[in-house]
Image: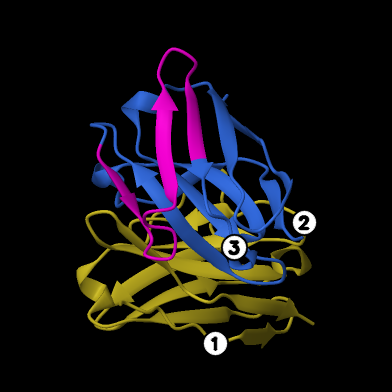
Amino acid sequence: EVQLVESGGGLIQPGGSLRLSCAASGFTVSSNYMSWVRQAPGKGLEWVSVIYSGGSTFYADSVKGRFTISRDNSENTLYLQMNSLRAADMAVYYCARDLGAAAGLAFDSWGQGTLVTVSS
Amino acid sequence: SYDLTQPPSVSVSPGQTATITCSGDQLGDKYACWYQQKPGQSPVLVIYQDDKRPSGIPERFSGSNSGNTATLTISGSQAMDEAQYYCQAWVSRGSVVFGGGTKLTVL
């Protein structure tokens, strides 16, 4: 069974840093496209970042230069390092697995989400 | 930047057909997919690659994509279908866009 479990969220002051983790089971993270998607309170879904199976990484303009996506193949875990956090970054952060290019690129598995609160 | 536009809300009577649209420039040239999200839950993929249903998604969910509009159709809507629905597309390598979401009310 495919499972994604996020952790690492919490309360952080503006300008601070946080690292989110997404532990995967039932499949291999490094063989899939993996993304982070966030949802601000009461708002819609916003794509944040992707890491391709080949290792290429891409970011939404809103986080470029501040966030870094990575993975640990030995731990089968996805990460999101978030620096210079702003109030606008406050959201539930989901990790999601992509079906891949052959299936039209859609997120077929999602974690339960981890809440990041940015406030002084 | 590329935008996907959805109506904020759609209402449907139980047993009737609900139609939710998603508009974007030449969206028909890309693959569209749809997610259902209920309050306090993670999104669930209901349609991918324009018109394909993942395993476990009821047959009453269907999709299409042509021109500038992708459409999610729910035939024989049920109370359990009441949720927020989001369309999504990969607009280029390394760029994903979601629509703003549509709240479906079944009443």
- In the image, are marks 1 and 3 on the same chain? no
Marks 1/3: CA distance? 29 Å
**In front: mark 1 or mark 3?**
3
Of pointers 1 and 2, the one earlier in the residue sequence = 1
Residue A72 x %, y %: 43, 21
Report if the CB atoms under discs 1 and 2 are less than 8 Å apart: no
> Which chain does the blue colour mark?
A
Marks 3/2: CA distance? 24 Å
**Residue receiving disc 3:** A86
Query: What is the secondary structure assignment of the residue under circle 2?
Result: loop
**In front: mark 1 or mark 2?**
2
Query: What is the secondary structure assignment of the residue under circle 1?
Result: loop
For the record, the magenta segment spans: A56-80
| Residue B106 magenta | no
Residue B41 x %, y %: 72, 53
| A62 vs B13: above or below | above
> Which chain does the yellow colour mark?
B
Residue B31 x %, y %: 29, 62
